[in-house]
Image (cartoon, helix red, strand yellow):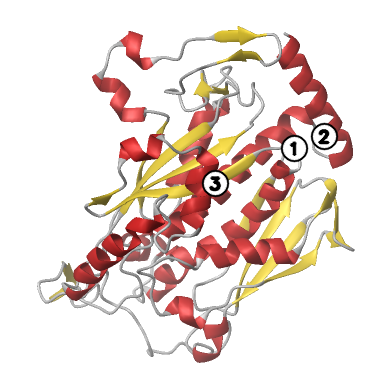
């Protein structure tokens, strides 16, 4: 089974990931991984940390001459800011009170994590709970995208809203998924209509002046996914559940829906489902995709469409701030602190692409075998033909 573990603290020396179960004979490059890492760091409204870090990957194992070996792949991204934190985040030596955090921030993992693991210095919590951890997710996702693209599966994303500012849903319908993605890549806020960037940017700037932060909604898609990934046989094998868990695990994501999602609850059965058609050249297909490419926990051959809601970043820079209590003295305080991002919705969309890529790559390998990619590709093509002729 394809799986990965990641490790590292936000201000530690490096972030690492070990990918196990990745097949042999896949051509990979650090340049492709670095490209995806750079996409994660972009987006209007990001903060100072993005100016410090220039994320690049070092592949330490599992690849020789640009070809995967089938053995575990080790990825490492060094933290450039580590040089300013060596004494604070030292692995050995005596503890220091420097940069100690005793005041838990509402909306973060600080308080619960400190109580759970027995830490009064909440830096022990926030260093790992930080969204900096998603750097390695994007690196792993890049490897998975390489795998998927080699069999024609394309993954992309775009932002639908930031705070009160929303993309026109009627205009959106006029664009293909590829057009939405291509346009979003030209937008500073990753919306499918770059000509509206200034409106979004002025709104973000206004919220920054007010000391506020912003969440939003983004959409992730996957095209040309084979029918029949996932299963209805057990609850934990249903692919929609796996995708929802993977996307929901991203920091600050509080809602995930597939296809038309919650809106289906407000309509009738006739308007909620996708009629089935058949043509000799293409086999079974749908003219609508309200199900978002998934039925009964399995892919149905239509585009997978996942929508996610991200809450506003919880640390604010405003005079009337969130309330909290010192973890030791129990004295109340205003949780107003400097923070990096006004909004990170564009970056979260890129992370969600990586999580969807990982889940789909894992399902592909589970269904078609997971050792030698050259053999697996042949099986996938035979299966696609089987589905078309069924």
Residue 156's disc is 3
* Pair 3/2: label in front: 3
Q: CA distance from mark 1 to mark 2?
A: 7 Å
Q: Which residue is mark 2?
A: 377
Q: Which residue is mark 1?
A: 151
Which residue lies at the image location 56% right of the left edge and 9% below the top edge?
A: 277
* Residue 85 visible in rendering: yes
Which residue lies at the image location 76% right of the left edge and 45% below the top edge?
A: 21
Quarter in which the N terminus is drawn: top right
Find residue 195 and report its horizontal and vertical position in percent. Answer: 37, 57
Q: Residues within 10 Å of mark 2 (few under 14, many from 20)?
A: some
Residue 130 image-quadrant placement:
bottom left
Q: Is residue 100 above or below residue 64?
A: below
**Contact (CB < 8 A) between labels 1 and 2?**
yes
Which residue lies at the image location 31% right of the left edge and 64% below the top edge?
A: 198
Q: Residues within 10 Å of mark 1 (few under 14, many from 20)?
A: some
| Residue nearer the viewer, 242 or 171 | 171
* Disc nearer the start of the sequence (3/2): 3
């Amino acid at each position: 089974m394809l799986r990965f573990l990641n490790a590292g603290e936000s201000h530690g020396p490096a972030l690492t990931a070990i990918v196990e179960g990745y097949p042999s004979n896949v051509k990979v490059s650090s340049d492709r991984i670095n490209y995806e890492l750079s996409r994660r760091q972009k987006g209007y409204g990001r903060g100072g940390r993005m100016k410090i870090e220039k994320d690049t990957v070092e592949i330490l194992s599992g690849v020789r001459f640009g070809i995967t070996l089938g053995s575990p792949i080790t990825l490492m991204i060094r933290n450039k800011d580590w040089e300013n934190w060596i004494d604070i985040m030292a692995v050995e030596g005596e503890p220091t009170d420097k940069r100690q955090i005793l005041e838990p921030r509402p909306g973060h993992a600080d308080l619960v994590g400190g109580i759970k693991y027995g830490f009064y210095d909440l830096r022990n919590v926030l260093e790992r709970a930080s969204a900096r951890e998603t750097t390695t997710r994007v690196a792993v996702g890049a490897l998975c995208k390489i795998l998927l693209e080699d069999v024609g599966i394309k993954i992309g994303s775009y932002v639908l809203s930031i705070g009160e500012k929303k993309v026109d849903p009627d205009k959106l319908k006029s664009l293909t998924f590829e057009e939405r993605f291509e346009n979003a890549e030209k937008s500073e806020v990753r919306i499918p209509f770059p000509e509206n960037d200034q409106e979004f940017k002025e709104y973000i700037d206004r919220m920054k002046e007010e000391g506020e932060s912003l969440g939003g909604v983004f959409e992730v898609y996957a095209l040309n996914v084979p029918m029949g990934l996932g299963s209805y046989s057990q609850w934990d094998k249903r692919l929609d559940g796996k995708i929802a868990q993977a996307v929901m695990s991203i920091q600050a994501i509080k809602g995930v829906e597939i296809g038309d999602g919650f809106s289906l609850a407000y309509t009738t059965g006739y308007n909620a489902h996708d009629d089935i058609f058949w043509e000799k050249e293409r086999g079974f297909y749908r003219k609508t995709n309200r199900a978002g490419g998934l039925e009964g926990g399995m892919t149905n051959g239509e585009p997978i469409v996942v929508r996610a809601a991200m809450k506003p970043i919880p640390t604010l820079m405003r005079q009337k701030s969130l309330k909290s209590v010192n973890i030791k003295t129990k004295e109340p305080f205003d949780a107003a602190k400097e923070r990096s991002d006004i909004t990170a919705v564009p970056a979260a969309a890129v992370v969600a692409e990586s999580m969807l890529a990982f889940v789909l790559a894992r399902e592909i390998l589970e269904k078609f075998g997971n050792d030698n990619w050259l053999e697996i590709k042949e099986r996938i093509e035979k299966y696609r033909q089987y589905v078309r002729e069924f």
